[in-house]
Image (tube, helix red, strand yellow):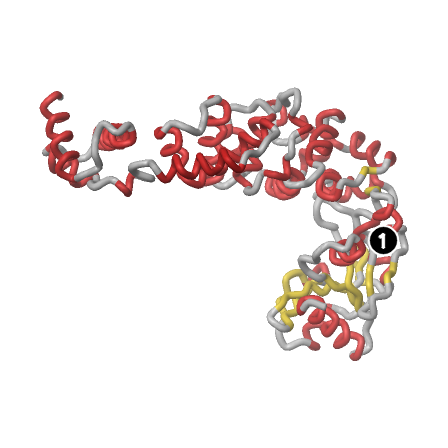
Amino acid sequence: MNLQKQGAIEVMMALEEAGYEAYMVGGCVRDEVLQKEVADYDLATSALPDAVRALFLQTIPVGLAHGTVIVRHRKQSYEVTTFRQEGPYLDQRRPSSVTFIATLEEDLSRRDFTMNAMAKDRHGKLYDFFGGKQDIADKIITTVGSPEARFEEDPLRMMRALRFSAVLGFTICEETQHALCAKKALLKRVSTERLAQEFIKLLGGQSAGEALRWLFTKDLVHDLPMGHMLQPRDDAFAIQWHEAETLQEQWALFLYEMGVTDATSFLKAWKQPNQVVKTVSKWLAFLHSGEALQTSSVLYQLGTGGAHACWRLQNIVRGRRSKERITELQEAIGALPIQSRQDLCLNGTDVAAWVEKEPGPWLHSLLTQIEEEVLAGRLVNERDRVKTWVKQWKENQ
């Protein structure tokens, strides 16, 4: 047993010794049933938040109004939430009210999918009131109760259904599929940041292609930010999406396969960080160019990390991998006379002094020319030689 689970059991024991019920709930139970590694353990209890805070030395009141307290134990954090029932969802995200209740079954009945509505006590006994274990065995995604009601409460659950389908390779049950199509317009009410978190996880799933195909087949894609820009390539849903290793690779691969050329507009609409936008734009431009990872200028512009990323992306797109080719790529990168502008034997201050001119836009342009000359092998990256070249450039102006 790992330390994180042992700590969760000790927190549950403390609650039980004080006269309360306590259970592991949600994703940790689902992942144990799936025999997958558990990321973290969330607990549900009959104890009110104030009672939880009184029992433990270190607590963080992250959501007292909704019954949630973080308990710090053995240098681990555990979300401990009081059994609760939720009022109507007025903003398609948060309930308008929360009522603390007495039973585990009532608490689990408010959850999204049956596979997430199971609980375990500290002895390992499974509490499965809604058939989650059987749905996992059948590889089916089913909501707890009415799918329309669950999606109206929080439309993000529609994207979560697709994300679980992509990651687990499960099929969304027919009733839930119908509700997804009927309620798809509600996706526009979900914050872009929340949508992006789920969508990025979807792209990393083993069955991402099928989930994306479903998005297009059922026309949910037009209810997502910038969905009108997406025109999938013929084989877009057949590639190995999960082989993209980073967030930037996932976005670059997605935009390429969806025929998008303006990465900046798309990713800004999805509220992605500026550095992600900048990197993806560069890689996407390379993929659309059809250039090979061979010339010094291409390798230099991409950088070592970018060149390796674009090698992976090209191989995903082409459906092949070659260990021999990556060796050639590494040798070509290693043979570059400079890896970045910082490797030049001079800087902007030197160049401005040699030209005897105040820095300005011309300086960036001249430094770029120097880089190109060095990469092409026409100029040796030695200070005296570069200084001579700069002096000659000045005379020719």
Q: Is residue 2 left or right of residue 288?
A: right
Q: Quadrant of the N terminus?
A: bottom right
The answer to whether residue 191 is visible is no
Q: Nearer the viewer, residue 282 or 55?
A: 282
What number of labels is visible?
1
Q: Nearer the viewer, residue 121 or 325?
A: 325
Provide the secondary structure element on which disc 1 rests.
loop
Q: Which residue is mark 1?
A: 109
The answer to whether residue 260 is visible is yes
Residue at the location (15% across, 29% down)? 389
At which x and y percent is residue 200?
A: 62, 40
At which x and y percent is residue 319?
A: 61, 29
**Neighbourhood count class around disc 1 (C-alpha, 10 Å): few under 14, some 14–19, many 20 upward:** some
Q: Is residue 332 left or right of residue 360?
A: right
Three-letter amino acid code of the residue under disc 1: Ser
Q: Is residue 87 left or right of residue 129?
A: left
On the image, which quarter does residue 101 sit in?
Answer: bottom right
On the image, which quarter does residue 244 sit in?
Answer: top right
At which x and y percent is residue 3?
A: 67, 69
Residue at the location (70% across, 35% down)? 187
Residue at the location (67% across, 37% down)? 189
Residue at the location (75% across, 77% down)? 14
Which residue of the protein is positioned furthest toward the front in this rendering?
324
